[in-house]
Amino acid sequence: MDLEQERELVFKAKTDADAFGLLYDEYYPKIFGYVLRRTASVETAKDITSEVFLKALQSIKNFRWRNIPFSAYLYRIAEHEISNGYKRNKHIIFLKQDIENSAIISDISLDDESARVEADIQKHEEFLLLHQCIVKLPHIYQEVIVLRYFEKKLISEICIILGKREGTVKSLLNRGLKKLKIIMDENATF
Amino acid sequence: MKNEDLIKKLESARLPEAELHTHRRLLKTALLKNYESASNKTATAAKRRRIPIMSIITGFFKSNRPAWQKAMVSTFAVVLLLITALAINMSPLVRDYEAMAMEAALNNPDVQQIIEDEEIDTQNIKIAAVFDTQNGLKYYVSIGEKNIVAVELSKWLFNTEIVEVLIETTPVTDTKKQELIEIACTDPEINALFEKGASIYMYYFDYIPAYLAGDSVLDVAHKASGQPLSIKNAQLMADDWVEFTVRLWFELDGTRYSIMLDMLDKSVFSFGPLSSIS
């Protein structure tokens, strides 16, 4: 989807639930994947992803298009939730109950699905070891490293997501890598 | 471990795309079921917050109040506007821009992180240089010996904005200093200033990662407005970043100057005096 198509879809989504659904379909995998790689926890990734889309829905009518991808806005919400220590709000509790009730009615086990993905993650030992080192970094370095190397974002895209200048992002990345190297060198497993 | 190895490790260790199909489907259903209530709640709250100032004003003037009351309110409003306008015009005289720039720098979370990481004493945080810009001033605040923050300050909007947090981690050796002076002195005007005894008081190195492309990598990066990521299909070839530009600030007889050196061409990219620091 190009930026112009996305702008039209966001505009439609202000009054049309189906258009919001299309935005959701486009970005759920990216946001869920990002939060999962940032937190390495399926449950947290589920909750934060739900929170991100609920917040996006709550603010869609007042959303002002600023010529930046909608995904950047979603990443920012996700990053805010991760950095500020995610806390469930009352709306998300209702939403979660809604999801769980639907699962019971459809006779589906959400826990089985989560357990399967959790087990998949556990197989990626190298990722988990790296993740353990990355989470020791201050958040400002964690986010640039994950966006650059796990999410494969360009510096220009990271600038938009984080709302920082290119020089700042490059400096943070350079500095973050140096710090990560020190942490990894201290860690005997690498 | 080398930088290159670390980057390879990071790139290879990423998790494959994982997705919870059921969660995805059920969350979508729950969101769309709540579409009306969730999206309207915030929109209504925002509408409710809007104060109908225009309707209050027009209502007052259309009301049956005596004419002297309306005239008094109008006069009072005009006087208030004049006082505000005067206050705005006067305030640049009393505002301490340097302190504003310093405050903006110190309130920046990235800067706070650097201060904490490097245990920088507040005495080592100084205004290093100031430039006049179209809309206001641009301050360079040095954080310790290696880091610089650029703060842009708008005179008319009374606000400050951190435009860049630049971090330099390589100490400048005497040999390096000599090399930089030699490059700078290829410009006859700069050469004349150094012959008169100009001395450099601050350095800033801007780095780009070393990339390998089809032809000359660094030329590609340079010609594409200095954005290293505009290089297509490039491969990381070195374990460190390469010098891209160096900014030097020097002083002669109380006048401060700024030079930007292009380290790829080993030439002077820009040069000019700084406005004096008040």
Image (cartoon, rainbow, N blue to C red):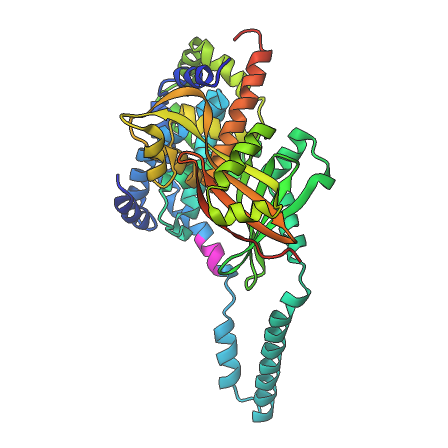
Please tell me whether residue A28 is drawn above or below residue B276 in the rendered image. above
Q: Is residue B27 magenta?
A: no
Q: Look at 37% across and 38% down and name the residue there.
A: A71
The image quarter in which residue B65 lies: bottom right
Above or below, comparing residue B228 to residue B79 in the picture: above
Query: In this rendering, does residue A45 appear at all?
Result: no
Residue placed at 45% from the left, 39% from the top? A166
Can you tell which quarter of the image residue B123 is in? top right
Q: Which percent across, then down, holds residue B278?
A: 67, 58
Dominant secondary-structure state across the stretch colored magenta: helix
Q: Residue at x 40, y 39 (%)?
A: A72
Q: A68 or A64, which lies in front?
A: A68
How many marks can you see?
0
Q: Position of residue B234 (x, y in %)?
A: 32, 25
Residue at the top extreme, as displayed: A189
Residue at 46% in and 51% down? B42
Residue occupying the far bottom of the picture: B67
Q: Position of residue A144 (x, y in %)?
A: 48, 30
Q: Is residue B83 above or below residue A6?
A: below
Q: Is residue A27 left or right of residue B198?
A: left
The residue nearer to you, when weighing A70 against B13, is B13
Which of B93/B104 is in front? Answer: B93
Q: Nearer the viewer, residue A49 or B271?
A: B271
The span shown in magenta is B43-47
Q: Is residue B178 left or right of residue A161?
A: right
> Looking at the image, is B95 positioned above or below residue B172?
below
x and y, in percent, of residue B98 in the image: 65, 54
Residue A128 shows in the view = yes
